[in-house]
Image (cartoon, helix red, strand yellow):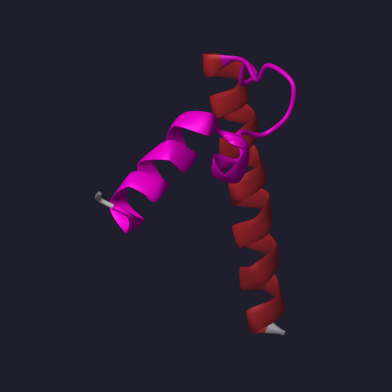
Amino acid sequence: MRRRGLVAWTILTSALVAVAVWTVLGPPDHSGGPRLSSRDRTSTDTISASINPN
């Protein structure tokens, strides 16, 4: 029973911290979706250059 209380306290505390940070800093400003390095041309060029230096 003690472990269940600790888990609940941890989850509630994490949620409270997340809400506080969201309130202070505001929502993240994402344009579109997440940036995937596999779709980013500059990172693909960098990876290709490191694999094939010639």
- The residue lying at 70 percent from left, 64 percent from top is 8
- The residue lying at 25 percent from left, 50 percent from top is 53
**Position of residue 45 in the picture relative to residue 50 (left or right):** right
Whole-percent x and y of residue 29?
62, 15
Q: Is residue 42 above or below residue 13?
A: above
- For the residue pair 53 and 46, the one nearer the viewer reads as 53
Which quadrant of the rendered structure holds the N terminus?
bottom right
Whole-percent x and y of residue 32?
74, 21
Whole-percent x and y of residue 34?
67, 34
Which residues fall within the magenta stretch? 26-52
Outermost residue on the left side: it is 53
Q: Is residue 51 above or below residue 20?
A: below
**Position of residue 28 in the picture relative to residue 46 (left or right):** right
- For the residue pair 28 and 49, the one nearer the viewer reads as 49
Residue 22 falls in image quadrant: top right
- The residue lying at 54 percent from left, 42 percent from top is 37
**Position of residue 33 in the picture relative to residue 50 (left or right):** right
Q: Is residue 35 above or below residue 8?
A: above
- For the residue pair 36 and 11, the one nearer the viewer reads as 36
Residue 49 is covered by the magenta coloring: yes
Residue 40 falls in image quadrant: top right
Q: Is residue 25 above or below residue 46?
A: above
Residue 13 is covered by the magenta coloring: no
Residue 38 falls in image quadrant: top right
**Position of residue 33 in the picture relative to residue 6 (left or right):** right
Outermost residue on the front side: it is 54
Number of numbered discs visible in the structure rendering: 0
